[in-house]
């Protein structure tokens, strides 16, 4: 009963390094999402994929890229990490993007950029 | 546009006393609303959801919330707090643009439970 799995759980990078955060879901959901969580700001949407083969920008996409590799996997890439990208990153999935059902979340990736 | 405001950033209660976490929303149509809980260093867990059925929604761990359209509120309550309820709570509204749904999060309320 894995649900949404994120790897790695923790990572420390130096400014300018690149990194890819991985996310996989086993619920056969069509839609997947990447959020970042910063203190006092709730979760903010970075990118989302309403269905396999499509991706769209969310509220805070600058400095990130995404790839919907297949229906199960949705990765988030930082090409040149900056200290402002220190955050906790959450991946989520949903059966259909227009559904009124709740999203399912992974446990997060805690990323520090020095 | 949809938005959600959690009226308290921090709430402190004693164990065994009632919990009230306040949430107001703004939506141009009948919204779907959710409360999520996040324990330290964990992901988000759904507590309950409102999707235009009964206005009083019961969730897990004894929590419930009442949808009040006239007040645009969706406050979370629990009759008796337990130490394990200490966590961060998020009120969330669904937003639709075309046929694409997104979640709009409140800023979060940290619940402290004192022994």
Image: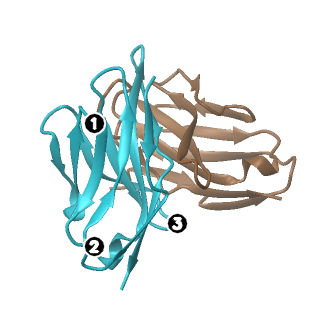
Chain colours: A brown, B cyan
| Residue at image coords 43%, 48% | B6
- In the rendered structure, the residue with mark 1 lies on which chain? B
Disc 1 or disc 3, which is closer to the eye? Answer: 1
Residue B8, image x and y in percent? Answer: 45, 55
* A4 to B2, vertically: above or below: below
Residue B92, image x and y in percent? Answer: 39, 41
Residue A39, image x and y in percent? Answer: 61, 55
Circle 1 packing at 10 Å, graded few (<14), some (14-19), many (20+), is few
Disc 2 or disc 3, which is closer to the eye? Answer: 2
In the picture of the structure, the residue carrying the numbered disc 2 is B81
Q: Residue furthest bottom?
A: B115
Same-subunit check for callouts 1 and 3: yes
Circle 2 packing at 10 Å, graded few (<14), some (14-19), many (20+), is many
Residue A15, image x and y in percent? Answer: 86, 51
Which one is in front, B73 or A94? B73
Which one is in front, A69 or B43? B43
SS label for mark 1: loop
SS label for mark 3: loop
In the picture of the structure, the residue carrying the numbered disc 1 is B71
């Amino acid at each position: 009963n894995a649900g949404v799995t994120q790897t790695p759980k923790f990572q420390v990078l130096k400014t300018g390094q690149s990194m890819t955060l991985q996310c996989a879901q086993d619920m056969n959901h069509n839609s997947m999402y990447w959020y970042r969580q910063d203190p006092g700001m709730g979760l903010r949407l970075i990118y989302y994929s309403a269905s396999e083969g499509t991706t769209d920008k969310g509220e805070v996409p600058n400095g990130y890229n995404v790839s919907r590799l297949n229906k199960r996997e949705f990765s988030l890439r930082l090409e040149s990490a900056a200290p402002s990208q220190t955050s906790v990153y959450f991946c989520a999935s949903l059966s259909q993007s227009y559904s009124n059902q709740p999203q399912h979340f992974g446990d997060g990736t805690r990323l520090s950029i020095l | 546009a949809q938005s959600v405001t959690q009226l308290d950033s921090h709430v402190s209660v004693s164990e065994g006393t009632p919990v009230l976490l306040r949430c107001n929303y703004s939506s141009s149509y009948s919204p779907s609303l959710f409360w999520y809980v996040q324990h330290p260093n964990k992901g988000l867990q759904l507590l309950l959801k409102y999707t235009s059925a009964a206005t009083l929604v019961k969730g897990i761990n004894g929590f419930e919330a009442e949808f009040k359209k006239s007040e645009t509120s969706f406050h979370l309550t629990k009759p008796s707090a337990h130490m394990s309820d200490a966590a961060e709570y998020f009120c969330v509204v669904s937003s639709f643009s075309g046929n694409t749904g997104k979640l709009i999060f409140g800023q979060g309320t940290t619940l402290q439970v004192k022994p």
